[in-house]
Amino acid sequence: MTKQKLHIVKIGGNIINDEALLTSFLKDFSALSTPKILIHGGGKKATELASIMGLKPKMINGRRITDEANLDIVTMVYAGLLNKKITAQLQKNGCNAMGLSGADANCILAHKRTVAAIDYGFAGDVDLVNSSTIKMFLKNNITPVFCAITHDKNGQLLNTNADTIASEIAIAMSGLYETELNYIFELKGVLESVEDKNSVIKHINSKKYKQLIKEGVISEGMLPKLHNCFSALEKGVQKVKIGDATLIKKENKLYTILSI
Amino acid sequence: MTKQKLHIVKIGGNIINDEALLTSFLKDFSALSTPKILIHGGGKKATELASIMGLKPKMINGRRITDEANLDIVTMVYAGLLNKKITAQLQKNGCNAMGLSGADANCILAHKRTVAAIDYGFAGDVDLVNSSTIKMFLKNNITPVFCAITHDKNGQLLNTNADTIASEIAIAMSGLYETELNYIFELKGVLESVEDKNSVIKHINSKKYKQLIKEGVISEGMLPKLHNCFSALEKGVQKVKIGDATLIKKENKLYTILSI
C-alpha cells in the first residue's frame, strides 16, 4: 500500500524575526494540502528578553549554555509567545494548528545532555518521538506545531535544537508516512559560492556532500544542518530539501534537494 | 445510557504561587481515575515579569487592562512557563497531560470584549468550546491542561478569565459527560464567617445563594466565582464544588457543594 504523504517543515530565526515574512510563510504553509507538521526555532526574542531581564548569555566555546533562568525564558518565548502566535495565525488561515512542546502528550522524550567536557545545562538530546500520538493528531485533521522544548518524563523541561527535533520527528514519522522534510533558512539553498545568492547547488547526494566538505564549500554553519538532513535520509526519510521561505511555494524551483 | 464521568478542576494563584502545594496538588490530580481536565490561572509571575520589564499594571475601576505588551507577557507566562511546567510535572506523575491554549486545535473561540464604558484591551469573552475536539483528546487518554489564553480565529490571542474558561468548558462537556466542576481557591469553601476558616457552608442551593448575597455573607471576591458556579449548574453541569487544594483528595469532606 502506498503511504500517505506527510510534509514536515522547519523554520528558524530568519522567518520568525521578520513579521511580514512570517505572515506570508504561514499563508503558504496553510495552503499545503497534505498532512503537515511545523517546527519552529526561537529567533532573537529570547535573547532580547534575557537582556531586558539582565541575564547575560552564557557561552562556552561558542555554544550557548541553558541555565535555569534561561530555560524559563526559552520556555516562555518558544512554547508561549511564538508557538501561540504562530498557532493563532495558522488558525486564521484555516489550518487547524495545535502548538506543542515535547512535554505535551509526551510527544518528544529527551534526556539532559551528559556532562562531558562542557556542561550545557538544561539542553536535551532526543530519545523518542511518539509517532502514534502525532499520527492520531494528523488523522484528526490537526496540524502539530512544535517548539524546540522537550522533557525528560521526570518533570524537567529541556531546551533542544530545533533542527534536530525536525529530523527526529521526520525519522519517526517516515515509517508511517512518505515523509518530506524541509529546512527553511536564510539562503535559497546550499550555495556554490557565498558571493552569489543564486548559485544554488540543486542536488547533493552523499558522495557530493563529502566532496563539498573536503572542498570547503560546506562551511561551519551548514555542517550541522546538512548532517541532520543526511541523518534523516539514512534513517528512512524519503525526501529532504533545504531553501528559503519560498521553498514550500509550488512555483519555486530554486532549492537544494538532498539524497543518499 | 449512563454518561461517563468527567472531572474538571480549576486552580488559581494560591496553588500556582506555592511550589510545594502545586507539586502535591498535581500528584492528587494525577491520581484521579476518571477522565479529567485542568484549567489554571496565572498567579503572580506575570505581574513580576511585567514589573521587571518596566511595565506598570494598567487598571481602570480596579479591573486590569490587557494592552499588547501585557498580552505578550501573559501569553509567555500562562501558555509558556506555567502551562509547560505543569504539563511536565503531570507527565512525571504518569498523567498524559497536554498543555493547551484556546487557539490550539481551535479549542476555545472568543471575541475581544466590546468596548463600552471601559476598554479592557485584549480581553476575551468565550463564544464556543469545541467539545468534540476535547472529547477526542480524552478518548485518546490525554488530559487537556488549559491556560487562560483564547483566540478569535482571526489571528488575535486574548486574555480570558480562568474561572470563566472552566465553567464554559464544563458546560460544553456536560452534554457528553456527567461533568463535575471543581473550583480550587485559598479557602476550604464558602465561609459563614471570614474569621473562622473552618466555618464552611457545606451546601448552597440557588435559594440560599440569593439569601447569602442579601445577608452580605457572600462578598465581592466570591460573587463572580459563585456566579460562574451557578451559571454552570443552570446550563447543565451536573456537580460543582468549591474548596481548597485538598478538595480533590478522596478523604476530604470539607468543601462547599453547590446545587440549583
Image (spheres, coloured by chain):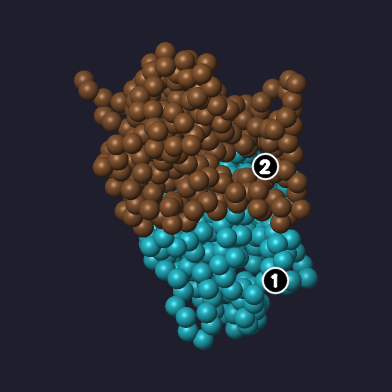
Chain colours: A brown, B cyan
Q: From the viewer's perspective, is residue A7 above or below residue B192? A: above
Judging depth in this view, the residue of B14 and A141 nearest the camera is: A141
Label 2 and label 1: CA atoms lie apart by: 25 Å
Q: Residue at x 38, y 50 (%)?
A: A26
Residue A77 screen position, x and y as percent: 59, 50
Q: Which mark is residue B56?
A: 1
Judging depth in this view, the residue of A230 and A30 nearest the camera is: A230
- Mark 1, other Cα within 10 Å: few <14 / some 14–19 / many ≥20: few
| The residue positioned farthest toward the bottom in the image shown | B117
| The residue positioned farthest toward the top in the image shown | A207
Q: Residue at x 67, y 46 (%)?
A: A72
Q: Which mark is residue A71?
A: 2
Evaluate whether label 2 is on the same chain as label 1. Answer: no
Q: Quadrant of residue B47?
A: bottom right
Q: From the viewer's perspective, is residue B105 above or below residue B125? A: above
Judging depth in this view, the residue of B65 and A169 nearest the camera is: A169
Q: Residue at x 30, y 26 (%)?
A: A178
Q: Is residue A208 visible?
A: yes
The chain carrying label 2 is: A
Q: Please indicate whether residue A206 sits to the left or right of residue A65 in the image.
A: left
Residue B129 screen position, x and y as percent: 39, 58
Tell me the amino acid under the disc marked 2: Leu
Q: Residue at x 55, y 61 (%)?
A: B162
Q: From the viewer's perspective, is residue A29 above or below residue A130? A: below
Residue B259 screen position, x and y as percent: 49, 65
Looking at the rendered structure, the secondary structure element under dot 1 is loop
Q: Please indicate whether residue A193 sits to the left or right of residue B201 in the image.
A: left
| The residue positioned farthest toward the front in the image shown | A195
